[in-house]
Amino acid sequence: MPRHRSKLSVDLSEPVPIPPEAIERAIDILHSGRLFRYGEFVAGESEVARLEREFADYLGRKYAVGMNSCGSTMFIALKSSGVEPGDKVLLNAFTLAPVPGAVEHAGAEAVFVESDRGCRIDLADLETKAKGGARALLLSHMRGHIADMDAVCEICDRHDVLLIEDCAHTLGAKWNGRRSGTFGHIACFSLQTFKHINAGEGGLLVTDDDEIAAKAILYSGSYMLYAQNAARPAIDAFESLKTRIPNFSLRMNELTAAVARPQLRLLGERKKRWRRLYQQLAELLSGIEHVRVPERDEREDFVPSSIQFFMEGLDEQKIADVLDACSARGVDIKWFGRPAPHGFTSTWRHWEYVDELQSLPETGELLKTVCDMRIPLSLAEDDCRLIADTLADAISGVNAE
Ligand SMILES: *Cc1c(COP(=O)(O)O)cnc(C)c1O
């Protein structure tokens, strides 16, 4: 008999809330009409410039450039670091569609790297593919799972591969005491609604390299107003570049920055809450037959806005039935094993614009079973129990059929 039949009342797609201070500031900006970050005759700093400075300080990096999405920052990261059409760029086979999209946008050739059983980039395959020659590694800390960064950096250095971090899921996270986003030559962050800071859309690129920062600012669409960027290199760095770098118009607007800034200060609190909820869910879910929650390395200090687990020993049809049964009780779980792309979960097999279908047996096996659930901050302890019971009921239901 199922333990109980109640339905989860929290909407798992619920975004993190926008703080009142952010709403007030956004309204002031709307009243002023000054929604564009640049102006020819401006007094004081724009909201975007302030966010750039605060963001760079938060991470301890020299420069930050705001853009309209993380996908845009990844594209500009590749362009600014000199990736040319036809260059090989390594990336995780298990990642989100904007990542191969950025590589395609830059005209580069995507070479996918396998995933290990913890959803991280597979170090042995990275070594093999880096040895084969590549200009850059666009490394996704997919769903917040951080690989051994000392090993990743060592492999990249040894093969002269430039490291760009995709930190869409690791804002506030650390590896071995050092912030995610400080390992790569460049790192890219997202302010999209389902990440750690919710500004609707938005991205930030960070780097310590003068030339890359100047190029990124010009590419992002600064016109000749780059002096108004706050976390930028000295004006000299722009002199020889300003007429050579095209303006791709990917700027961040003032509302986005106004909505994001107060949330940067709330990250610590949010992280604590997410960690507590993750701990509870991980414990409860691990106790269910057919469910495996990946072990986390103790050097990984993660910020889990979602939880991943593997449904093992059940065939595709059974997994689909389990997820349908959960969904009917308000527990929406994403699954990367669907044959057809669905919602946010397309996989490398579906990215047909990439020239050849690459053979990635380990990732293929992994993705058959990977499930993914968001962790809204408003979840209570009882809700965690209800989620686990719902999943356990659904699994015993399909097994009894
Ligand atoms: C969301 C996400 C991105 C892209 O972020 P956008 O701001 O939506 O462009 C990149 N990488 C990963 C792994 C993501 O989950």
Image (cartoon, grey):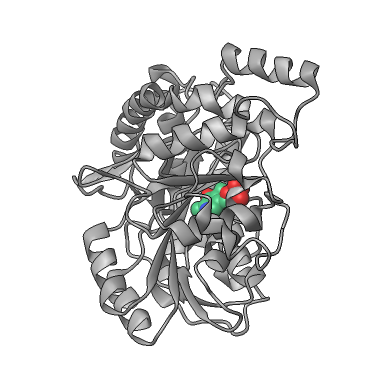
Seen in the image, is 179 located left or right of residue 88?
left
The quadrant where residue 14 appears: top right
| Image coordinates for residue 303, horizontal then vertical, percent | 37, 37
Q: Residue at x 63, y 56 (%)?
A: 218
Coordinates of residue 18 in the picture (x, y in percent)? 59, 20
Tell me if I can see residue 70 in this picture. yes
Of the pair 60 and 318, the residue shown nearer to us = 60
Q: Position of residue 371 (x, y in %)?
A: 47, 49
Q: Is residue 395 above or below residue 32?
A: below
Relative to 364, residue 394 above or below = above
Which quadrant does the N terminus fall into? top left
**Which residue corresponds to the image point at 41% horizontal and 27% vertical from the top-left?**
267
Q: Residue at x 46, y 68 (%)?
A: 91
Asked which quadrant contains residue 349, the reply is bottom right
The part of the image, by quadrant, that contains residue 329 is top right
Total numbered labels placed on residues in the image: 0
In terms of depth relative to the viewer, which is nearer, 135 or 224? 224
x then y, percent, for residue 393: 45, 35
Q: Residue at x 56, y 69 (%)?
A: 348
Residue 336 appears in the picture as rendered: no
